[in-house]
Image (cartoon, grey):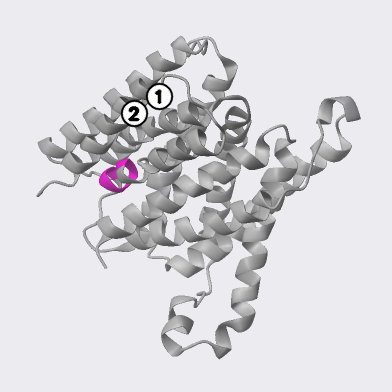
């Protein structure tokens, strides 16, 4: 299956996942939402491990988890730390910003991913691919101007700063994924299972500090919602598609990352239809069209 097709499918699921995150954290405490979402992902993997022996042989092969060295465990723990930090900043930002702004802001991730991929992995995107990425970044800039019209000052808003920091860490994670899958040659199932495990390990102290280390007035209210476990399952699906794309022969992380960021289209529509965020729709739609055009250019004949 084409790594480009896998990337597009991952982007669609990622858009739904982002919408579920927004619904889960709106007027809700962030640490337990993060923890229980991660715990759902690990629990799902544990169930898959239990039923693997009764599945068809092809499925068993796809879900096989290889033994790892301590060095490889260290790398996967590092991914858990990196993604946890990205999520903490990103979730807090998403809680306080409209998804029709927050989603596209995260679309700046391809710039950082390409920078890291070119500097540290030696990737060499073509001139056409660079042009496509430039179009995506231009769309991001347009969204920053639209946000200003809605009272969001990008250079002074602390939640925008959190979102950008979370995006930067997410871009680093994307490059890290290629190292895990192509350099260390970990299989997708092995990476997903241990990543889900270490995500819970890293998140546990965070939620314990929230529960026992803060005064009740500072913790905020936590409300259980069905979107919280749905977030965990959504992450498993989008990551499975994403890791499969990265692991494919000839895959370029500097191309996969911009494709995934078109998930903002799904979040944008969800913001309109579900969250009723309908300010400056015309300009936002135009910026999204530029973003989509950029993805098409990125995937033009290379």
> In which quarter of the view is residue 48 placed?
bottom right
Task: Give the residue pinned by disc 2.
Answer: 285
- What residue is shown at x 47% (from left), y 89% (from top)? 56
Task: Give the residue pinned by disc 1.
Answer: 281
Q: Which mark is residue 69?
A: none
How far apart in space, not on screen, are marks 1 and 2 (Cα)?
6 Å
Q: Residues within 10 Å of mark 2 (few under 14, many from 20)?
A: some
Q: Secondary structure at mark 2?
A: helix
Image quadrant for the N terminus? bottom left
> In which quarter of the view is residue 27 placed?
top right
Q: Residues within 10 Å of mark 1 (few under 14, many from 20)?
A: some
Of residue 6 and residue 174, the one placed in the foreground of this image is: 6
**In the rendered image of this protein, does residue 156 appear above or below residue 228?**
above
Instruction: Give the left or right position of residue 4, taking residue 128 as reference.
Output: right
Of residue 240 and residue 187, the one placed in the foreground of this image is: 240
Q: Is residue 259 magenta?
A: no
Residue segment shown in magenta: 254-258
Asked whether residue 254 is in view, the answer is yes
């Amino acid at each position: 299956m084409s790594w480009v097709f896998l990337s597009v499918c991952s982007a669609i699921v990622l858009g739904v996942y982002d919408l579920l995150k927004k619904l889960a954290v709106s007027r809700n405490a962030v640490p337990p939402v993060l923890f229980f979402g991660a715990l759902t992902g690990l629990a799902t993997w544990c169930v898959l491990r239990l039923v693997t022996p009764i599945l068809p042989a092809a499925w068993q092969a796809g879900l096989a988890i290889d033994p790892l060295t301590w060095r490889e465990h260290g790398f996967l723990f590092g991914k858990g730390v990196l993604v946890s930090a990205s999520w903490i900043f990103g979730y807090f930002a998403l809680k306080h910003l409209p998804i029709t702004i927050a989603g596209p802001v995260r679309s700046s991730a391809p710039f950082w991913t390409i920078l890291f991929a070119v500097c540290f992995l030696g990737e060499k995107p073509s001139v056409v691919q660079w042009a496509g990425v430039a179009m995506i970044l231009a769309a991001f800039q347009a969204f920053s101007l639209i946000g200003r019209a809605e009272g969001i000052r990008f250079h002074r808003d602390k939640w925008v700063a959190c979102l950008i920091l979370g995006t930067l860490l997410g871009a680093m994670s994307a490059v890290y994924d290629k190292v895990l899958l192509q350099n260390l040659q970990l299989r997708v199932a092995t990476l997903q299972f241990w990543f889900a495990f270490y995500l819970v390990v890293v998140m546990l102290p965070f939620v314990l500090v929230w529960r026992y280390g803060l005064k009740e007035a500072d913790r905020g209210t936590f409300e259980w919602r069905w979107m919280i476990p749905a977030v965990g399952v959504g992450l498993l699906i989008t990551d499975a598609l994403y890791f499969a794309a990265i692991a494919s022969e000839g895959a370029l992380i500097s191309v996969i990352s911009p494709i995934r960021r078109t998930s903002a289209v799904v979040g944008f529509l969800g913001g309109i239809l579900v969250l009723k965020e309908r300010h400056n729709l015309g300009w936002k739609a135009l910026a999204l069209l530029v973003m989509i055009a950029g993805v098409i250019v990125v995937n033009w004949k290379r």
